[in-house]
Image (cartoon, grey):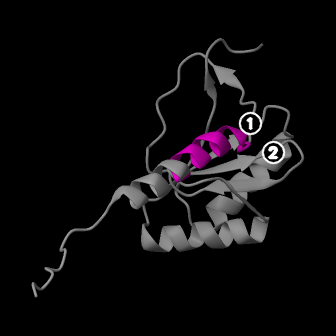
Amino acid sequence: MRQRRLMNQINVVPYIDVMLVLLVIFMVTAPMIQSGSVNLPSVDKVPAPPTDAMIVQVKPNGDLTLRATSQSPDRPLSRRDLIGEVQDAVSANPGQSVIIAADKSVKYEQVMNTLNDLRNAGVNKVGLQTQIGKSAR
């Protein structure tokens, strides 16, 4: 009687099927993800912001969100949590820059309070983000 040889190959077809199903699921759900938008004021010419800067968004209702890196999503935070996150980043990298992106309908006082909080947290490089285009006068 002949002995059977063991098969030493992996059948990858089921793995490819699962991958394709997941790809279709992600392609269908990706457009459904809502991204927040901030209506920034516009100016004529501005330099490009640093790519490693943290972005703090001030919404018209006063809510704050933080985007720690260009690849990370916006996270809604309270003022105290925002300051804690920024202080952690500044302690790890003293040259960390932060950009404030405030909607143009936000009160000037809210933007200045956020700017003051960031400066008190130890951030030396704070900037304000605007849209490039014709300035509204």
Q: Position of residue 77 (x, y in %)?
A: 75, 63
Residue nearest the viewer, comparing 80 with 19: 19
- Residue at x 67% of width, y 37% of height: 31
- Residue at x 49% of width, y 38% of height: 49
Residue 49 is a magenta residue: no
Amino acid type, mark 2: Lys
Residue projecting furthest to the left: 2
Q: Position of residue 71 (x, y in %)?
A: 50, 51
Mark 1 crowdedness (10 Å alpha carbons): few <14, some 14-19, many ≥20: some
Label 2 near label 1: C-beta < 8 Å? Answer: yes
Query: For the C terminus, which image quadrant?
Result: top right
Q: Position of residue 69 (x, y in %)?
A: 51, 54
Residue nearest the viewer, comparing 125 with 30: 30
Q: Give the SS element for disc 1.
A: loop
- Residue at x 79% of width, y 31% of height: 104
Find disc 2 in the rendering and name its residue: 59
Q: Which residues are magenta?
A: 22-34
The answer to whether residue 7 is above or below residue 3 is: above
The answer to whether residue 28 is above or below residue 48 is: below
Amino acid type, mark 1: Val
Q: Give the prevailing secondary structure in the magenta stretch.
A: helix
